[in-house]
Image (tube, rainbow, N blue to C red):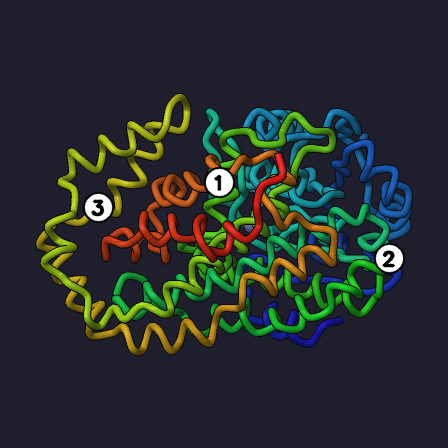
């Protein structure tokens, strides 16, 4: 059992037990019994996760004396999506089963679906983790697509997690690569939070920060070990992912501790259904890893700028009115994404007067922002190398994103969420478009990594 996780659990609201280790599937029943007493249980799985752990989980639950109703099984193919229809499907299945507690077997999707469905019924649940593929296991909230817009739906985290390392190690390598992609974004996400903190927009909660940032260096330190299936490397990654979820559970306000501008690249592409026609579909963490490189490439340039000499009058003169800002969003989005993007953008809109005040603060705080963020971020090329080693995505062309689309994503993804990040900082200081453009010309990061198509 990880000491870090144990310490975090003592203080967590929703999750009471995390059993992480080798050969721990057989503790599922004992944990269920301890938390839920004589409640009946139902196993929720899909064809793949049932194959991997179904028998062992059922055997453990039965051995502990848990009375089980028939399992709820989704097919192995096509892949189950985290959309609200499936939340309703599970909820409507559970609703007539009075007091029955779910034990899901899965990773991102099944855990998120069961989490929200159980919460809507006012019930708790537990999950048996099948892959080190994302950080949502212990998170407060589920990432669900509703009417075409992906967002975090509020719901309590699982009361228990069983993280059997050999089971998670046996998942396809792309699952581990995707988990690392999801986790490594916490590096620039931390820098986003530092800016928001310095500018008085969203203060850093130090305990929450420590939960997510503390285990991070170790978790991403051995990509080669992750590629070759080294148990210690996987353990570090799983620990980082679970801790990241616990940080969101503690923070509650939002997914801020674990999700910054790099995630917004992924969310934009997800809502555009990028790679969803693939089988298996392109995963969240693959796109997040790509977004991480994108943001870090930008950071390298930004840290060289001296914003303490910013021309405030020029920036304020350039600032769009509310109508112009809304019109810009309307030019950039269509369909299901449009109205939510308008709302997210306008939620964070500030007037020219407010901008002036903020930019005065930027001038004053820049030395401290620069210093703290320089310590926080990593070179984009280093993350590129890590993701390459572990089998992740490190160039947009690998996921069918053209140079033009990628270039535009830098600008568009700023509009899809109200959370203040580096992208907002650059928009407000008036340099976003120019700094992004520079990445694609001359000796810019992406100019040196041409598209082959
Ligand atoms: Zn994520």
Is residue 16 shown to the viewer in this render?
yes
Residue 134 coordinates in the image, percent (x, y): 64, 51
Secondary structure type for disc 1: helix
> In the shown orientation, is residue 43 left or right of residue 262?
right
Q: Is the C-beta of the residue carrying label 2 under 8 Å from the nearest atom of ligand 1?
A: no
- Callout 2: 10 Å neighbours few (<14), some, many (20+)? some
Residue 233 coordinates in the image, percent (x, y): 77, 67
- Callout 1: 10 Å neighbours few (<14), some, many (20+)? some
Residue at the (72%, 42%) spot, across then down: 104
- Identify the image quadrant of the N terminus: bottom right
Looking at this view, is 384 or 5 the one in front?
Answer: 384
Q: Are marks 3 and 2 in contact (CB under 8 Å)?
A: no
State whether residue 136 is above or below residue 117: below
Q: Is the C-beta of the residue carrying label 3 under 8 Å from the nearest atom of ligand 1?
A: no
Residue placed under numbered mark 1 in the picture: 406
- The part of the image, by quadrant, that contains residue 6 is bottom right
- The part of the image, by quadrant, that contains residue 164 is bottom right
Residue at the (15%, 67%) spot, across then down: 360
Q: Are marks 2 and 1 in contact (CB under 8 Å)?
A: no
Residue placed under numbered mark 3 in the picture: 349
Secondary structure type for disc 2: helix
Residue placed under numbered mark 2 in the picture: 166
């Amino acid at each position: 059992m990880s000491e870090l996780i144990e310490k975090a659990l003592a203080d967590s609201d929703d999750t009471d037990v995390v059993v992480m280790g080798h050969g721990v599937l057989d503790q599922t029943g004992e944990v269920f019994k301890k938390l839920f007493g004589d409640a009946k249980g139902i196993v929720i799985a899909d064809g793949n996760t049932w194959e991997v752990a179904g028998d062992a989980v059922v055997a453990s639950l039965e051995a502990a004396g848990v009375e089980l109703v028939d399992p709820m099984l989704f097919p192995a193919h096509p892949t189950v999506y985290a959309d609200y229809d499936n939340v309703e499907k599970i909820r409507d299945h559970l609703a007539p089963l009075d007091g029955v507690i779910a034990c899901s077997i899965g990773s991102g999707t099944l855990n998120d679906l069961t989490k929200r469905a159980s919460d809507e019924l006012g019930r708790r649940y537990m999950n048996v983790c099948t892959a080190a593929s994302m950080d949502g296991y212990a998170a407060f909230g589920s990432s669900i697509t509703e009417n075409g817009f992906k967002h975090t739906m509020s719901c309590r985290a699982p009361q228990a997690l069983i993280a059997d390392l050999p089971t998670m190690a046996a998942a396809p390598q792309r699952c581990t690569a995707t988990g690392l992609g999801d986790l490594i974004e916490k590096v620039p996400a931390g820098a986003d939070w530092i800016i928001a903190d310095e500018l008085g927009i969203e203060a850093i909660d130090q305990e929450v920060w420590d939960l997510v940032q503390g285990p991070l260096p170790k978790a991403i330190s051995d990509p080669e070990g992750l590629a070759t299936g080294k148990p210690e490397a996987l353990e570090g990654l799983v620990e980082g992912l679970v801790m990241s979820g616990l940080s969101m559970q503690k923070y509650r306000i939002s997914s801020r501790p674990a999700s910054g501008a790099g995630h917004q690249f992924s969310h934009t592409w997800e809502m555009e259904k990028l790679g969803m026609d693939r089988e298996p579909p392109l995963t969240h963490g693959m796109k997040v890893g790509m977004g991480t490189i994108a943001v870090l490439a930008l950071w390298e340039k930004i840290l060289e700028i001296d914003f303490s000499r910013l021309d405030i009058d020029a920036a304020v003169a350039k600032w769009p009115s509310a109508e112009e800002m809304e019109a810009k969003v309307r030019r950039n989005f269509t369909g299901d994404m449009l109205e939510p993007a308008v709302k997210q953008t306008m939620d964070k809109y500030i007037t020219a007067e407010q901008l002036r005040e903020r930019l005065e603060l930027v001038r004053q705080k820049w030395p401290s922002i620069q210093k703290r963020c320089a310590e926080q971020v990593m070179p984009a090329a280093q993350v590129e190398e890590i993701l390459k080693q572990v089998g992740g995505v490190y160039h947009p062309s690998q996921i069918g994103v053209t140079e033009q689309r990628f270039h535009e994503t830098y600008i568009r993804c700023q509009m899809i969420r109200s959370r203040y990040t580096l992208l907002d900082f650059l928009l407000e200081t008036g340099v976003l478009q120019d700094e992004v453009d520079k990445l694609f010309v001359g000796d810019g990061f992406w100019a040196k990594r041409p598209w082959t198509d």
